[in-house]
Amino acid sequence: MRKHLSGPIEIVLAMLATVAVSLAQVGSATAAAAPASNVSSVSAASSGPQLQQRYPRYKVQAGDQFDVNFELSPEFNQTVTVQPDGFVTLRGVGDVHVAGETVPELTETLRKAYSGILHDPLIAIVLKDFEKPYFIADGQLGKPGKYDLRGDTTLTQAIAIAGGFTETAKHSQVLLFRRVSDQWTEAKIFDVKKMEHDGNLSEDPFLHPGDMLFVPKNTFSKIQRFIPTANVGTYVPLRTP
């Protein structure tokens, strides 16, 4: 009896072994493919617009000037200016790249730079001359240009600051461009004519530093909400900030 059953049993065991190997191979392939899928998802998500922080910190840029004060080593106190290439020349340590850093990040960068010659340096950074908040007004306005953004300023107030509409202005399609990341700029159209006619300014947005408003002469029937920052010039003749 055992002799008659041994053949079928061996066949069944061989089949089970084959199935087990196949399942293991499928599992390995799935596990290997999973990270790639995740990377693709992350990559796809990162390619879309990323909104800015609600209260973004100021980042040091070329031309900014700041004081570097040492609590325990005042002989190293100095005032430095960020060069066009983003570097500053520091007393005792040489050139250090600081462009694009917030004040807390800048403080840590300088602390690390001086840790080679000072023990646990205590450094305080005080910005002296830096890029003030601004907005740009362009298009069919009395005085297009770059203006300081002082306090809470709405779109209609910014238009008034820039000299108001000209006779050829399209009041109903005022464009507001706002950078939401390094690669993306948000574009919205506002019907200022309707807001003023209805006496309802509830939809009158407050400007953010760096915003650009553009008053066209012709109708913009369609515009994408998010556009690559590099393509903003397709819609308006950008001015140098």
Image (cartoon, rainbow, N blue to C red):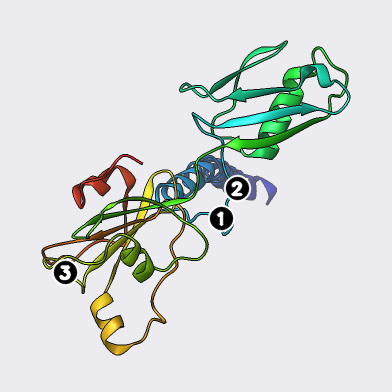
Q: Position of residue 85 (x, y in %)?
A: 47, 21
Q: Nearer the viewer, mark 2 or mark 1?
A: 2
Q: Which residue is mark 3?
A: 170
Secondary structure beneath dot 2 equals loop
Which residue is located at x 64 percent, y 37 percent?
Answer: 127
Give the residue displayed 61% in from the left and 43% down from the top: 10
Residue 115, x across and y down, in percent: 80, 18
Q: Is residue 97 above or below residue 47?
A: above
> Is the C terminus in the top left, top right, bottom left or bottom right quadrant?
top left
Dot 1: few (<14), some (14–19), or many (≥20) neighbours within 10 Å?
few
> What is the C-alpha distance between the residues marked 2 and 1?
9 Å
Tag 2–tag 3 contact (CB < 8 Å): no
Left or right: 98 in relation to 48: right
Q: Are marks 2 and 1 in contact (CB under 8 Å)?
A: yes
Q: Which residue is mark 2?
A: 57
Q: Nearer the viewer, mark 2 or mark 3?
A: 3
Image x and y of residue 181, in percent? 44, 48
Q: Secondary structure at mark 3?
A: loop
SS at mark 1? Answer: loop
